Image (tube, coloured by chain):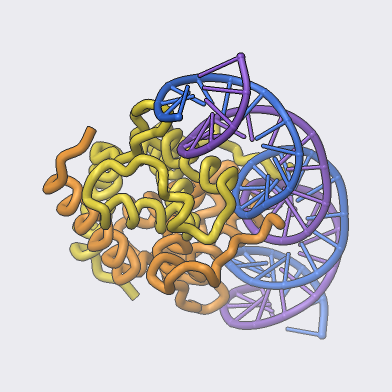
Chain colours: A orange, B yellow, C purple, D blue
DNA sequence: AAACATTATCGTAATATTGCAATATAAAGA
DNA sequence: TCTTTATATTGCAATATTACGATAATGTTT
């Protein structure tokens, strides 16, 4: 047991779940917000902004990248991170559709 | 270690992370989508819709309820579940703001 | 009351996540 | 080349999640 039964659900359901899961940690939310705040690609200093060790931050960045939420461009010996808009759009669209559907239904 | 360092992040960051985390499982996405599909509160038969045992579904419902994503009203010996719009609104607003910020910034 | 239906909780096994020290890798500069 | 700087990977311990059988709790029906 313990393993998620991924193959029992649709691709879309898994896609949304994977993206949401990647955002399901305050450190990763903090990384996203920092990328937004500096308003440009940032090379490196995310580690200094977070109360976490460098390997931990590196791991969180990896998960955000795997989920498609950020992009990382190699720039010399540093890496330039920035937000990948497309994936956030998928989420926004998804939630917008949910809210539109819900407001049209009478509930308890 | 292994425990998330919740207290090092802001309340808002933790709030968004908790909601996103609750959506970070395909079974819970499937539950939400089923609630949308039937277009009304549904009493019970969520278990029959999912490829999971009753205790597992009950646990997923609990997590969705804890995150504020669904509401459950007791109706006789059954329970009537439906989507809690407010929490989805929080998410939609949050992502809309992110996308608005990103589109205004030039990136790699 | 007894039987049934519905949902929750407990206990537990399997697996995943989180966090970090230590180490590796890769590019830049002296 | 050697050192420094920046990031990734490895390995491991602590904790969390997922899933389910067994059982409890609660209300309904007969």
- In the displayed structure, does residue C16 sit left or right of residue B82? right
- Residue B86 visible to the viewer: yes
Q: Is residue A54 left or right of C4 when viewed as pictured?
A: right
Q: Quadrant of the N terminus of chain A?
A: bottom right
Give the quadrant of the C terminus of chain A.
Answer: top left
Q: Give the residue furthest to the left.
A: A104
Which residue is at a point 15% across and 53% down the rendered structure image? Answer: A100
A83, above or below A23, in the image: below
Q: Quadrant of residue A81?
A: bottom left
Q: Residue A74, percent across and down? A: 50, 78
Q: Could you tell me which residue is drawn at 34 percent across and 36 percent down? A: B80
**Count of labels shown?**
0
Q: Residue at x 74, y 42 (%)?
A: B1
Could you tell whether B44 is left or right of B63 in the image? Answer: left
Give B93 or C10, whichever is nearer the viewer. C10
Asked if B69 appears above or below A10 in the picture, the reply is: above
* x, y percent for residue B96: 22, 54
Q: Is residue A86 above or below residue B47?
A: below
Q: Quadrant of residue A97?
A: bottom left
Does residue A31 appear anywhere in the picture?
A: no
Q: Which is more toward the observer, B41 or B105? A: B41
């Amino acid at each position: 047991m313990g393993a998620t039964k991924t193959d029992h659900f649709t691709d879309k359901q898994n896609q949304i779940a994977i993206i949401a899961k990647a955002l399901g940690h305050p450190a990763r939310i903090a990384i996203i917000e920092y990328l937004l705040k500096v308003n440009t690609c940032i090379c490196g200093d995310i580690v200094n902004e977070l109360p976490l060790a460098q390997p931990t931050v590196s791991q969180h960045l990896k998960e955000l990248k795997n989920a498609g939420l950020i992009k990382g461009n190699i720039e010399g010996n540093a890496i330039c991170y920035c937000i990948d808009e497309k994936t956030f759009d998928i989420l926004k669209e998804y939630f917008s559709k949910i809210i539109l559907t819900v407001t049209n239904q009478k509930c308890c």
